[in-house]
Amino acid sequence: MNKRIGVVAIIVENRENVDDVNKLLSNFGEIIVGRMGIPYKEKDVSVISIIVDGTTDEIGALTGKLGRLTGVNVKSALTKK
């Protein structure tokens, strides 16, 4: 299966799930190229952006597991080829 490059945006509204988010990102570390996380204290959210390089199945598994966490919103954009 072909690999694709993409960006995954994660907004964590429920701070109780920050540890779960970090564990998942660590588990999928082989497809993560870079990561930037910003705690937005005034709005009581954390915003994380990750650059990924993996198959659509790998990226979909990561975003699916993140999206099932309460208070975590996830969006992704991938290259077409």
Image (spheres, rainbow, N blue to C red):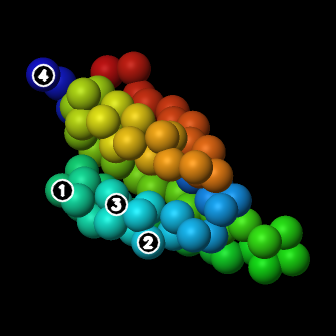
In the rendered view, would you say 64 is above or below 51?
above
| Left or right: 73 in relation to 44 | left
Mark sitting earlier along the chain (2/1): 2
- Give the amino acid at mark 2: Asp
Residue 7 visible in rendering: no
In the rendered view, would you say 66 is above or below 17?
above
Q: Quadrant of the C terminus?
A: top left
Q: Which residue is mark 4?
A: 1
Q: Which residue is mark 1?
A: 30
Mark sitting earlier along the chain (4/1): 4
Mark sitting earlier along the chain (4/2): 4
Identified at 45% across, 47% down, the residue is 66
Residue 15 visible in rendering: yes
Label 3 and label 4: CA atoms lie apart by 22 Å
Look at the numbered disc 1 and give the secondary structure of its residue: helix
| Picture disc at residue 25 | 3
